[in-house]
Amino acid sequence: MTVSFFFGVLGNVTTGLIYLAPVKTFWHILKRRSTEEFESIPYVFKLLNAYFWTYYGIVKPDSVVVATVNGFGVVVEIIFVAIFLLYAPPRMRKRTAILAVTCDVMFPAAAILVTQLTLDRQMQITVAGLLSAVFSMVAYGSPLSAMKTVVTTKSVEYMPFLLSFALFINGGVWTVYAILTQDYFIGIPNGTGFGLGTAQMILYAMYYKPRTKSSSAEDKVGQPDEPLIDPTSVPQVVVAQEKD
């Protein structure tokens, strides 16, 4: 086993756990048989991103670890989007269906078909890597709003530690993998994510305050049960508001 393969397998574990992070939210939706105020857009675009990372892992030699975890992500995100289509109110169901067909069926199918029919293998790798990196960079920008809230309120209440730590570890693992394999398409977005994760850890050290019983009771009044950031964007993450 090479060192790069070891970090790839480790990245599969961390990324797989992050893909599964919204299970609590979707279990809540299934029990209530309603999506309530939850938003489907993040999951539609995470599915799109997972498609392209899977495609990238398939067309690029020796990148099976990239294809496997993101192939798993495709399955998970399809289930999440399907749940939205089943339990969303009519207006959101219609919007989700239009987005899913456009972004998760037509666009990736057209992109893959065009690259397969018109480009050589090296250009297929370049186009797939570029699209994957662009979508991942957009996703990695999502924690910025939560970080701004922490600085403004001087509180880490809406930036969950486990999520921030998971993104920090995941970004670091895939950055090391990218360095070892000299893969800039993986390295740039995950290096960015690792930097943002490091910044979040620093903010925790600066603004974390132990919760007292009185403040905990007060916080329960009129506050959402879950933070405002969706724990699923990696290396393909987008923000969504989640509740228990």
Image (spheres, rainbow, N blue to C red):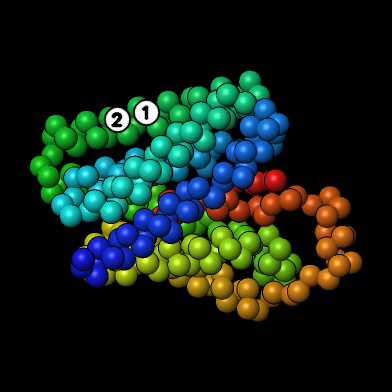
- Mark 1, Cα crowd under 10 Å, few <14 / some 14-19 / many 20+, is few
Q: Name the residue type under label 2.
A: Ala
Residue in the image at 63% along x and 20% along y? 90
Q: Are marks 1 and 2 in contact (CB under 8 Å)?
A: yes
Q: 191 left or right of 58?
A: right
Mark 1 to mark 2: distance in Å? 6 Å
Where's residue 73, x and y in %?
41, 44
Q: Does the rendering let one see residue 192?
A: no
Residue that protrudes farthest toward the front in the picture: 1
Q: Which residue is mark 2?
A: 109
- Mark 2, Cα crowd under 10 Å, few <14 / some 14-19 / many 20+, is few
Give residue 105's mark: 1
For label 1, the SS is helix
Give residue 202's mark: none
Q: Name the residue type under label 1.
A: Val
Residue in the image at 63% along x and 61% along y? 160
Residue closest to the eye, 73 or 6: 6
Q: Does the rendering let one see residue 201?
A: yes
Where's residue 191, x and y in %?
38, 67
Of the 4 image quadrants, the one containing the N terminus is: bottom left
Q: 83 left or right of 72?
A: right
Say how many tags the image has. 2
For label 2, the SS is helix
Residue in the image at 45% along x and 39% along y? 76
